[in-house]
Image: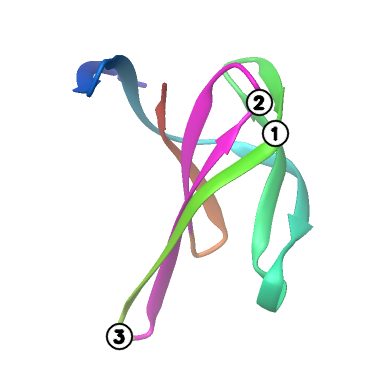
Amino acid sequence: MSIQEASYTIGEYAMITNQINSPVSITAIDFGQDMEAIPKRMEWGGRTYQFIDRGIRVVARRGERVSSTVTMSDGEQSFCLRHHSGVWTLLSVC
């Protein structure tokens, strides 16, 4: 697993984002509108993260291929996750 760090400044706020791009285990899900899967708990790096808030969700369609990206928060960090073909991938943590 390779972690790359990137810094961003948005207005007065500075953010450090760690690019992860690693498969993770989603151990609990909820369902939103149209039965969309929403992660509730994730295991990554030997730790368990319980999500308490959902941010932006983007669904991308290319032909018959569909993938979604969602941001989740455990109250301390934000996690960007991609769901494609039944596999969840942690894209970044900030």
**Which mark is nearer the camera, 2 or 3?**
2
Q: Residue at x 32, y 21 (%)?
A: 17
Q: CA distance from mark 2 to mark 3?
A: 34 Å
Q: Which mark is residue 8?
A: none
Q: Which residue is mark 1?
A: 51
Residue closest to the far front: 12
Which of 76 and 31 lies nearest the eye of the viewer?
76
**Rendered position, 72 above or below 84:** above
Where residue 13 appears, as percent x and y from the top left, is: 30, 16
The magenta segment is: 64-83
Q: Specify the quadrant of the image occupied by residue 91.
A: top left
Where residue 68 appears, as percent x and y from the top left, is: 45, 61
Helix, strand or loop: magenta stretch: strand
Where residue 70 appears, as percent x and y from the top left, is: 49, 50
**Quadrant location of the N terminus?**
top left
Q: Amino acid at mark 2?
A: Asp
Q: Which residue is mark 3?
A: 63
Q: Residue at x 65, y 68 (%)?
A: 36
For label 2, the SS is loop
